[in-house]
Amino acid sequence: MVSGTLHNAHQPDSFAFTKANLEKVDQIILKYPEGKQQSAVMPLLDLAQRQIAEKGPYGPYPTGGGWVTRAAMDEIARILDMPPVKVYEVATFYTMYNLNPMGKYHVQICGTTPCMLCGAKDITKACKSTLGIEYGETTDDGMFTLSEVECMGACCNAPMVQINDDYYEDLTVEAIVNILEDLKAGKSVKPGPQQGRKGSEPIKNAV
């Protein structure tokens, strides 16, 4: 897993939400009943991770990807008036929170049975070959981090990968290589099924 450890070597000394995100913090906390504000810990961790992704590198990579620093967790604990260890417990339990510096693009390959039966091994091999990294590693330029994940609920469109917030489905080796190369080149790529169908409708001309 890329989620990592609280003790990695790239921990900034401080973290502060931006003015715009502080307004979002207030809006998020207001969703919870009086006395239950600590339940906002999960969306605040997500907000911190997204801010770090947007603001750039908090670590060794030049591009910067979304992850949650220990300083960010401590700030969330202060805002919610809860012991920092309680925030650490949430952040280390859920794999959607990354605790290591990440690449700009987090490529998450589904390795569960439906995707595996539909060619996930070939997709994995193509990703590793194209990027020159293994699972849990980040390219030297900080552009890509590669992970294997469990089912993400797109079984009818297997095989699939998630890159940041987007799903890429109905993949072939050629399709995933093209997606990665386009991202490298700074081009926009269209998420969703890659064989022309909409949603999970039948593939045209399928046997």
Image: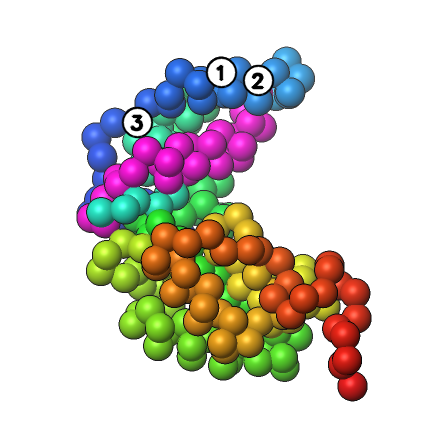
Residue 138 coordinates in the image, percent (x, y): 30, 60
Magenta region: which residues? 37-61
**Residue appearing at x 77%, y 74% in the figure:** 204
Q: CA distance from mark 1 to mark 2?
A: 6 Å
- Residue underneath mark 1: 23
Above-or-below relation of 123 to 201: below
Query: Would residue 186 be counted in the magenta stretch?
Result: no
Secondary structure beneath label 2:
helix
- Residue underneath mark 3: 15
Secondary structure beneath label 3:
loop
Is 16 positioned to the left or the right of 32 in the image?
left
Bin the neighbour count of mark 3 within 10 Å (Cα to Cα): few under 14, some 14-19, many 20 and up. Answer: some
- Give the mark nearer the N terminus: 3 vs 2: 3
Q: Cβ–Cβ below 8 Å for labels 3 and 1?
A: no
Which amino acid type is marked by label 3?
A: Phe
- Residue underneath mark 2: 27
Assign the N terminus to one quadrant of the image. bottom left
Above-or-below relation of 44 to 199: above
Assign the C terminus to one quadrant of the image. bottom right
Query: Would residue 41 be counted in the magenta stretch?
Result: yes
Residue 77 coordinates in the image, percent (x, y): 41, 25
Bin the neighbour count of mark 1 within 10 Å (Cα to Cα): few under 14, some 14-19, many 20 and up. Answer: few
- Give the mark nearer the N terminus: 3 vs 1: 3
